[in-house]
Image (spheres, rainbow, N blue to C red):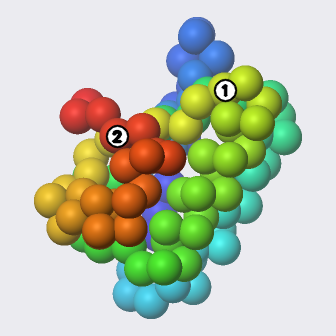
Amino acid sequence: MLFNIGYSEESRVRVCVTGVDSGTQSLPGLKQILIKLHQEGRIHQVLDLQYCQELDEMGFSVLLIANRLCRNSGGSFILVGVNESMRNCIKKYQLERVLVIEDS
């Protein structure tokens, strides 16, 4: 995966997944980026998945870890650009109770 990280004045950081390679070898990279941002005090994170077609169990695990870190620090973790296939998986596993999804 290729990532683009943008910072806003509101102390919110937006991580955009701009390219996806096959397999899950890049998921640890995404996990490391999200954890590092949290350690830097960026507890309000937006993850843009518009270029990501699907997520497997490992991908959802990364999302849940980032969500837990941000929420436990009084921050927020928001997903945007989630396609219909990912939304269906999120609903199937009842993750909409935990994850915040916005349209833009």
List the residue tagged with mark 2.
Answer: 101
- Which of the pair 100/36 is nearer the observer? 100
Q: Position of residue 43 (x, y in %)?
A: 70, 30
Identify residue type, mark 1.
Gly
Q: Who's the residue at 38% across and 68% down the image?
A: 93
Q: Position of residue 63 (x, y in %)?
A: 54, 57
Sooner in the amino-acid sequence: mark 1 or mark 2? 1
Q: Position of residue 12 (x, y in %)?
A: 58, 23
Q: Residue furthest top?
A: 9
Q: Who's the residue at 73% across and 44% down the image?
A: 69
- Label 1 secondary element: loop
Q: Residue furthest left?
A: 84
Identify residue type, mark 2.
Ile
- Label 2 secondary element: strand
Q: Is residue 13 above or below residue 3?
A: above
Label 1 crowd (10 A; few <14 / some 14-19 / many >=20): some
Q: Residue furthest bottom?
A: 23
- The residues tagged by marks 1 and 2 sit, at their Cα atoms, a distance apart of 15 Å
* Residue 90 shows in the view: yes
- Which of the pair 18/71 is nearer the observer? 71
Q: Are the residues tagged 1 and 2 within 8 Å (C-beta)? A: no
Q: Who's the residue at 42% across and 38% down the image?
A: 100
Q: Residue furthest right?
A: 39
Q: Position of residue 18 (x, y in %)?
A: 37, 56
In this picture, residue 53 sits left or right of residue 36: left
Label 2 crowd (10 A; few <14 / some 14-19 / many >=20): some
Q: Is residue 49 above or below residue 104?
A: below
**Quadrant in which the C terminus is drawn:** top left
List the residue tagged with mark 1.
Answer: 75
Q: Is residue 27 above or below residue 19?
A: below
